[in-house]
Image (cartoon, rainbow, N blue to C red):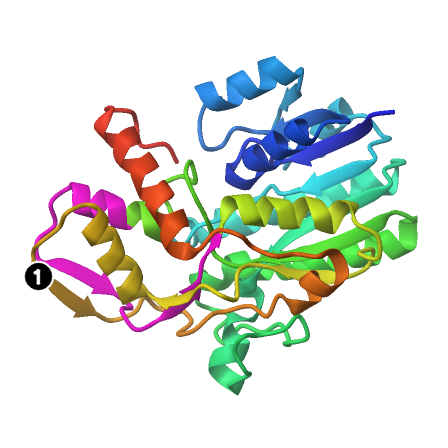
């Protein structure tokens, strides 16, 4: 019998790619629940939905009544929905707090009265960005690193605060109301179709707008970038493999830690930029180094990223270059 799968936030970057991987794997009946905050359903998502009989529920899930449109007996529920992006934390931090908190609390209250078997809540490495800076914990970091932010007044951390709420909420509700729950913390997932609020597409946009000289912000910061295909396989395995209930896992790529300068210079090379570069300071609240220890996920469910950072960045840059040169709108 096919598994009934619900993806809350399934039209987003990771949601779309998770849906695509699930239908390719087979044995599933999929429902996507989303408010299409990033815009209308694009042709890629529409084709995926129509070809595979994916059910779409378009509603504002910050409102509890929207959950009445869902069924109550899904085998797997992927909770992916949230407002994410540094630009949103700086421009609409109060809305980010409101939207993400209501999404979490409404989902939990719906689960309390449902018969869903297992839930996966997607969190973020941002939850302990302050820990690394304030207490000098070792990098690569394990899941045992304490969650911490170092300036509650900085809007940069509003996203992390809501993810901390979600982690605690889903773990405690699962214990109280009898459903299984797994938490994953993403680390710098990237790839084609990820929107324009993240570092790689923003850098591509700046090159294509002929910025010269080109400024490298936070040039000496490091990030471990995780290509979308690898992140999706880690997400699905964390849900479906045994011995993951009640556990927290990193989904990232500990092999791929690079400086922002390395990233920008490589993108410039791909886009044939020959001008000078200027090194600039960091954005407020931006952690100096980030790299996950993924050995727990490797041990428990065999997580092993396959795509090297240069191969993944090349695919991503080529997709965005073609998208922009085709004259398409810059979606959110």
* Number of marks drawn: 1
| Side of 137 where 166 appears, left or right | right
Q: Quadrant of the N terminus?
A: top right
| Side of 46 where 178 appears, left or right | right
| Side of 51 where 120 appears, left or right | right
Q: Is residue 284 magenta?
A: no
Of helix, strand and loop, which one carries label 1? loop
Look at 90% across and 54% down and name the residue there: 176
x and y percentages locating residue 82 in the rendered image: 57, 44
x and y percentages locating residue 179 in the rendered image: 88, 47
x and y percentages locating residue 108 in the rendered image: 77, 45
Asked whether residue 83 is in view, the answer is no
Q: What range is drawn magenta here?
A: 203-226
Q: Quadrant of the C terminus?
A: top left
Residue of label 1 = 276
Asked whether residue 157 is in view, the answer is yes
Look at 20% across and 52% down and name the residue there: 268
């Amino acid at each position: 019998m096919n598994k009934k799968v619900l993806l809350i936030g399934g039209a987003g970057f990771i949601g779309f790619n998770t849906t695509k991987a699930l239908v390719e794997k087979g044995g599933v009946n999929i429902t996507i629940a989303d408010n299409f905050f990033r815009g209308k359903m694009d042709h890629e998502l529409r084709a995926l939905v129509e070809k595979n009989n994916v059910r779409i529920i378009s509603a504002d899930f910050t409102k509890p009544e929207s959950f009445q449109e869902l069924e109550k007996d899904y085998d797997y529920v992927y909770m992916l929905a949230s407002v994410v992006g540094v630009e949103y934390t700086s421009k609409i931090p109060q809305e980010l707090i409101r939207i993400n908190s209501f999404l979490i609390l409404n989902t939990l209250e719906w689960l309390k009265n449902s018969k869903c078997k297992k839930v996966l809540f997607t969190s973020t490495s941002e939850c302990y960005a302050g820990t690394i800076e304030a207490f000098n914990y070792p990098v690569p970091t394990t899941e045992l690193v304490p969650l911490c932010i170092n300036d509650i007044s900085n809007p940069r951390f509003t996203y992390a605060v809501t993810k901390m709420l979600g982690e605690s909420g889903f773990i405690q509700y699962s214990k109280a109301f009898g459903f299984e729950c797994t938490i994953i913390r993403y680390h710098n997932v990237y790839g084609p179709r990820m929107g324009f609020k993240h570092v790689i597409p923003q850098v591509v946009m700046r090159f294509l707008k002929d910025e010269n000289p080109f400024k490298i912000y936070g040039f000496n910061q490091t990030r471990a970038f995780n290509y979308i295909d690898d992140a999706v396989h880690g997400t699905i395995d964390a849900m479906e493999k045994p011995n993951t209930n009640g556990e927290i896992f990193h989904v990232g790529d500990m092999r791929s830690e690079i400086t922002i300068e390395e990233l920008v210079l490589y993108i410039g090379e791909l886009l044939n930029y020959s001008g000078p570069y200027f090194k600039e300071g960091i954005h407020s609240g931006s952690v100096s180094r980030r790299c996950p220890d993924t050995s727990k996920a490797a041990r428990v469910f065999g997580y092993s990223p396959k795509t090297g950072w240069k191969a993944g960045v090349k695919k991503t840059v080529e997709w965005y270059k073609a998208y922009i040169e085709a004259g398409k709108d810059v979606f959110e």
